[in-house]
Amino acid sequence: MSASDTAALMTSSALSSRDLFYVHIDERQRSITLGFTAQEGHEGFEFFIEFTDVRDVVVRGWAAPGHKDVQLTQTVEGITVSVEAEGSSLSFRAASMSVARSRSFHAAP
């Protein structure tokens, strides 16, 4: 995956248009990994974004996997992340983020 592909994935509008199906909070490594997936016809694509040096984590409820409103804001201190859907939310601050893994696959329509 090229740097421009990665940059295009990590915009709020791109993330909000994909299903968030995975959230892993690792308190020992102070990281959060979010997994997203998208499908067009028989082609599927999933990717995982890892946020490091995470702090100020707030979770309120959690809904089933699906489209959520994802907001990423670059600040002087790093990145502010907000994930919201009806009845649930996740927010935190992180020092950095990167695509930890991605893959394409054949999917049922």
Image: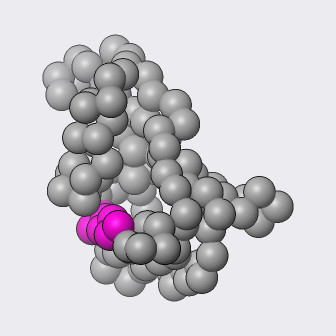
Determine which quarter of the picture holds residue 95.
bottom right
Residue at x 25%, y 53% (from the top left corner): 11
Please tell me whether the stretch drawn in magenta is mainly helix, strand or loop.
Answer: strand
Residue 86 image offset from top left, x and y in percent:
31, 79
Classify residue 32 as left or right of residue 106. right
**In the rendered view, how is the structure colored?**
one colour
Q: Nearer the viewer, residue 77 or 18?
A: 77
Residue at x 29%, y 41% (from the top left corner): 7
Question: Does 32 appear above or below 74?
Answer: above
Residue 83 image offset from top left, x and y in percent:
38, 70
Determine which quarter of the picture holds residue 56.
bottom right
In magenta segment, residue 70: yes
Q: Would you say residue 63 is visible in this rendering?
A: no
Question: Does 29 appear above or below 38?
Answer: below
Determine which quarter of the picture holds residue 43.
top left
Range covered by the magenta-colored residues: 68-74
Q: Would you say residue 37 is visible in this rendering?
A: yes
Residue at x 22%, y 24% (from the top left corner): 109
Quadrant (top left, top right, bottom left, bottom right) of the N terminus: top left
Residue 12 image offset from top left, x and y in percent:
25, 59
Classify residue 86 as left or right of residue 60. left
In magenta segment, residue 109: no
- Find the residue positioned furthest to the right: 28
Q: Nearer the viewer, residue 36 or 31?
A: 31
